[in-house]
Image: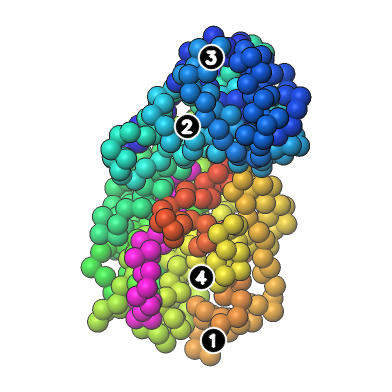
Amino acid sequence: MPDHALEFSARAGSVIPFKTDCLIVPVPGKLPLPAAAAAVDAALGGQISALVTAGDFTGALGAALMLHQPAGLAASRLLLIGTGKEPPMPRDVLNLIAAAARAVLGTPAKSAALLVTDLLGEREPTTFARQAARLFCEAGYKYRPGDDNGKRGKLARLTLVCEERSQVRTLTRGLELGAAIGKGINSARRLGDLPGNVCTPGYLAEQARELGKRHPGVSVRVLDEKQMAKLKMGALLSVTAGTVQPAYLIALEYRGAAAQAPVVLVGKGITFDSGGISLKPGAKMDEMKYDMCGAASVLGVMEAVAAAALPVHLVCLIPTVENLPSGTATKPGDVVTSMSGKTIEILNTDAEGRLILCDALTYAARYKPAVVIDIATLTGACVVALGKQASGLFSPNDTLAAELLAAGEASGDRAWRLPLWKEYDEQLKSNFADIANIGGPEAGSITAGCFLARFTRDYTWAHLDIAGTAWNSGPKGATGRPIPLLMEYLLGRIDAAGNA
């Protein structure tokens, strides 16, 4: 079931007479109040100042206080949202907007207005609006919309209210882009949250085709197992050997800037990962339906890029399979030949993501890419190293790594760079093949990155390990990461090309 679409708009003027179900006013934790909040305070006869002075509203970052039927305002509700005692930093603004969204969506309000004058300051309005729309979309996501009996989360319209009329146009453009990104994120989350018996490799292929129908600028090609066999994708096909579900390689292309070499995103699409013959422990194995979140994220990026008609040349590749044990499954000790011609000794069938990715990364070279980024829920070792806070970033290219790290900081979807030193690469030696698919118990996420690097020598490449960030275990649910990071990176490339 699709989420109801949020409508976004911007306007200039006073919020005092503006009719809305909920007016959101950012308020700091100390007096005097900034100009726009002070004007609202004056209309209320000093009620906000009194709450701050008495300590009933601390103004701490993200703190929320809802006032009903505020006398002096046309709004039905007034939500005070704390900005902290010091001017909020960029990441603070993201956190307080997210807190405001959660608070509003916890009420029956159908419309809301956010007073942005005091928050904008020197901030670029388009960026601010894009982030606001994206965060409100994210907060409104529900896998099962009827869980609350329809009493909450009814928000249908959000208006950003500013002081300068000249800002309305730029805010509006930012809202449009943020809504497209939010839709892509929520689409990816829904795919991740679907059970493995629904979201199969064939289902992902069907969703890619549907995306192409919605956006005529997106071309879609789906390679089946016979076609992949002709391409000698032995590594990928070894993973699907134990299941009856057919595997696919899905390729989507959007030529928003056809003259440019494309950015290629490769998303790991293991729709369920039992570990194969190297069977995983039973506890929490249900969460292995999320092993296709890399695939979901690149579909979400394509959805956002196409919906916003961005001037970028984008290719998304999705190798998608199911990894199950059976009498036909690949066994530990088997040796397979990848599309690149490199032979791989499979020491652990639960290290399967790198096997489907290596063939997709070899296939990516035919697009003559400007850059290739693979996105994968690849290793539990990355979760141990970085937890849920940051995705693991690997790249031999310092410029690309810096750009991705900056995009993560700007979007609030952070990554942390880990090394690809030659010493780690030594752990992948095999007596029986060119390379082993695991490097032993030490530095598991790094040796996985070193494995992938073997197949990316011909182009600029980065790897994002999202095993810790793609979903939450409690309460369970997909996050849509790293779509915010990837979209920020693409927008940065677009901006750089426009300013060149």
Picture quarter with the N terminus: top left
Residue pushed farthest front? 54
Q: Distance between the residues labelled 3 and 4?
A: 54 Å
Residue 310 in picture, x, y percent from top left: 53, 32
Answer with mark 2 or mark 3, whichever residue precedes in sequence: 3
Q: Amino acid under label 4?
A: Gly
Q: What element carries label 3?
A: loop
Disc 2 marks which residue? 104
Label 1 or label 2, whichever lies nearer to me, is: 2
Give the residue furthest to the bottom.
431
**Relative image position of residue 146 (x, y in whole percent):** 28, 40
Where is mark 3, residue-wise?
A: 71
Which stretch is magenta? 276-305
Position in image of residue 367 (x %, y %) = 51, 50
> What residue do we see at 52% from left, 57% from top?
469
The answer to which image quadrant residue 398 occupies is bottom right
Measured in 3D between alpha carbons, the distance from the residue under mark 4 to the one under mark 2, in whole angstroms, is: 36 Å
Disc 1 is placed on an element classified as loop
Please report whichever mark, 4 or 2, sits nearer to the chain's N-terminal start.
Answer: 2
Quadrant housing the C terminus = top right
Report which residue position mark 1 lands on. 430
The residue that disc 4 covers is 380
